[in-house]
Amino acid sequence: MCLIVLAWQVHPDYPLAVAANRDEFYARPSAAAGPWPEDPRVLGGRDLEAGGSWLGLRTDGRFAAVTNVREPGAPRGPRSRGELVRDFLLGERAPVEAAAAVDGAAYSGFNLLLADRRELWYRSNRDGAARRLEPGLYGLSNLRLDTPWPKLVAARTRFGAALPRLPGFEPAFAILADPGLVPDPDLPATGLALDWERRLSAIFVQSETYGTRASTVLTRHRDGGIRLEERRFGPRGQPLGSPLSLEGAGPS
């Protein structure tokens, strides 16, 4: 997952609203969003190579998502970052406990969001101790929380403006589908070749080998009901299949 914008306790009817793009190599096998066999209360996609996930939501309000930290040439951690999402969604630890328990040395650089119906926590092994997030709009790409990369700032601002249009998801999907590139003087310098810095500066990334594989919008209503919609893509941003729309009732 390479871009997440999130509204936490901002909308009066939707205390959690998320729009996210997962960027990955097209060759990496993955499963589309759906109920998980280990626990059908969990809705989300799965990485079929390492068994984890990039984003998911449980009907009792648990939510988790992860992005990688862009570190060209850095040694790889022995464990998959997708485990962090999987283990939280299948577990029962409170977000603060789960965030504190992560062995950051076991993973390549990551940013992790963990929430239940009461609290949202952020943990990164490149940004100090875990911290509880107050109500507000947040954005993650491939550095630290709210790093002002142009695409993150644009997506977060536009997402905030689109929140009054909930429960409609189309305004959020329009943000996630933006392929516009950032002018060279405004590109972040992350150690990649210039052509890749350009390509990855878009909200919606396209190439023959790597790009936005899935766009996801999800909400949790104040009555507990959850809704998740996923749209999948192949090389050069070609749509794959029909959008997947999943819903679940909150705790009784």
Image: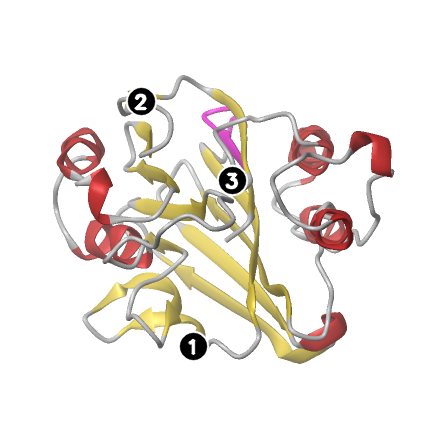
- Residue 106 shown left or right of residue 168 in the figure: left
- Given the image, on which type of amino acid does mark 2 rest? Gly
46 versus 204 height, above or below: below
Q: Residue 128 carries which label?
A: 2
Mark 3 highlights which residue? 17
Q: Which of marks 3 and 2 is in front?
A: 2
**Is 161 inside the magenta-drawn segment?**
no
Q: Residue at x 37, y 25 (%)?
A: 127
- Neighbour class for label 1 at 10 Å: few (<14), some, many (≥20)? few
The range drawn in magenta is 5-12
Instruction: From the top left corner, tell me how far across and down residue 145 is, in percent.
Output: 48, 28
Q: Distance between the residues labelled 1 and 2?
A: 32 Å
The residue lying furthest to the top in this view is 134
- Neighbour class for label 2 at 10 Å: few (<14), some, many (≥20)? few
Q: Which of marks 3 and 1 is nearer the N terminus?
A: 3
Q: How far apart are marks 3 and 1 (CA)?
A: 23 Å
- Given the image, on which type of amino acid does mark 3 rest? Ala
Q: Which mark is residue 31?
A: 1
